[in-house]
Image (cartoon, rainbow, N blue to C red):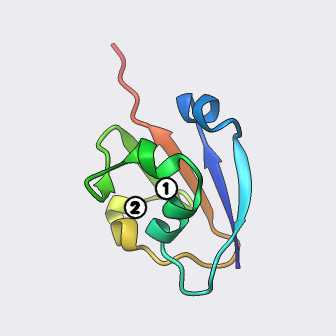
Amino acid sequence: MKVVVKVFAVLRDLLGWKERVFELDEEASLIDLIRRIDGLKELILEGGELHPDYRVFINGRYIGFLDGLSTRLFEGDVVAIFPAMAGG
């Protein structure tokens, strides 16, 4: 299956792209996708969990309201990864 991944802000600079399509096995989960993307795992995971400085959405839904990193992916899903923003 094919899944679209979009990265934002500093992740674009660090990874060198803003959107890519990845081919995954039919039973793949979000963690499988993250492990497949060169350099991403080291940036957004900490101790096997999502680093608190990052937010991941699948089709516009925050993974904290889904099954987290275990969320199963499906053909055509769009995964968006953002660094957490702070402001004042």
**Residue 16 relative to residue 10: left or right:** right
Q: In this view, does 60 lie above or below 26?
A: above
Image coordinates for residue 76, horizontal then vertical, percent? 70, 71
Identify the image quadrant of the N terminus: bottom right
Few, some or many residues within 10 Å of mark 1 (<14, 14–19, 20+): some
Q: What residue type is labelled 1?
A: Phe
Image coordinates for residue 50, horizontal then vertical, percent? 33, 52
Query: Which residue was labeled with disc 1?
Result: 57
Query: Which residue was labeled with disc 2?
Result: 63
Residue 33 falls in image quadrant: bottom right
Contact (Cβ within 8 Å) of mark 1 with mark 2? yes
Residue 27 circle label: none
Q: Is residue 20 above or below residue 53?
A: below
Question: Which residue does the image show at 56% across and 35% down from the upper left?
Answer: 11
Q: How many discs appear?
A: 2
Question: Which residue does the image show at 48% across and 78% down from the upper left?
Answer: 72
**Residue 4 relative to residue 59: left or right:** right
* Cα separation between marks 1 and 2: 6 Å
Question: Which residue does the image show at 34% across and 64% down from the upper left?
Answer: 65
Of the image marks 1 and 2, the number of the one nearer the N terminus: 1
Image coordinates for residue 22, horizontal then vertical, percent? 70, 65
Image coordinates for residue 52, horizontal then vertical, percent? 29, 43
Few, some or many residues within 10 Å of mark 2 (<14, 14–19, 20+): some
Residue 88 falls in image quadrant: top left
- Is residue 86 visible in the rendered image? The answer is yes
- Is residue 66 visible in the rendered image? The answer is no
Dot 2 lies on which element? Answer: helix
